[in-house]
Amino acid sequence: MTVPVAPSLGNKTTAELKVLRGGFRLIWSAGGPWERFFLLAPGLYAAYAIMLGALATYYSTSSNAFVRAILVAFSYLGLIDSWQTPVMSASVLRATIGKGLNRSDENAMLLSQYLESLGRGGRWYFGNILSLAYLATMVSWGVVAVDFPSLTGINDLLTFGLVDTVIVLFLWSVYRLGLMRFLRNARRAGFPVQPPRRAAT
């Protein structure tokens, strides 16, 4: 999704906020429970991480517990495909067309048509289930992060950051490969959908 370019920084910020608010309302109304859940997932996870970190600050013997919890929260936000693609069901994609929310409305239409051709409510079920598994993984990783020193004997924040980076890169790579395979299947089926980073919905 992109935001229309406005003539000045002030107008651009206002336009961005309007589009974001409008996009949120549109997705909320056009989507079902699955889409709404993943629309809220980043915010819910951020709140969870802050609560976890705050509790850890009072009950953990490690001084870096809160920092580790927040780092994991940012890591989950970095797995953007895993919480963004479940929102983009066929019904939501059709609702966004002509609203200035897509880089390419044609691409959004092609993707919605392909999703509808699969049945399953116009959703990419494998990707959605993987997204749910990723959320559960990151929730669990947040708990481990808080108690990382007592579990591993390592209290060094840099070492934890390296471990976190490896985990996130692995999860991101697996999901991205799955997404690219899904788009290749769409093109083979006669729907020339472009990858999200090039001509995205």
Image: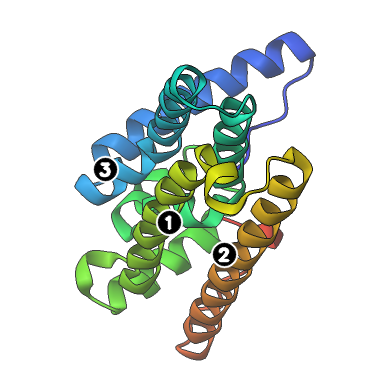
Residue at numbered disc 3 = 30
- Tell me the CA gap for discs 3 and 1: 28 Å
Label 3 secondary element: helix
At label 1, the amino acid type is Thr
Residue 48 x, y percent position in the rendering = 40, 31
Q: Is residue 186 left or right of residue 4?
A: left
Residue type beneath disc 2: Leu
Tell me where residue 88 appears, x and y as whole percent: 40, 54
| Residue 74 relative to residue 57: left or right | right
For disc 2, the marked residue is 171
Q: Front-most of 102 and 185?
A: 185
Q: Give residue 190's mark.
A: none
Position of the N terminus by quadrant? top right
Quadrant housing residue 134: bottom left
Distance between mark 3 and mark 2 Cα atoms? 29 Å
Taking the view exactly as shown, the residue that stands out farthest to the bottom is 188
Vertical placement of 108 versus 55: above or below?
A: below
Is 161 rendered above or below residue 173? Answer: above
| Residue matched to label 1 | 137
Residue 120 visible somewhere in the drawing? yes
- Binning the other alpha carbons within 10 Å of mark 1 as few (below 14), some (14 to 19) or many (20 upward) gives few
Q: How is the image coloured?
A: rainbow
Q: Earlier in the sequence, mark 3 or mark 2?
A: 3
Instruction: Kindly check if marks 1 and 2 are in contact, taking CB atoms under 8 A apart as contact.
Output: yes
What number of labels is visible? 3
- Please tell me whether mark 1 or mark 2 is closer to you in this view: 1
Residue 77 in view here:
no
Q: Nearer the viewer, mark 3 or mark 2?
A: 2
Of label 1 and label 2, which has the lower sequence position? 1
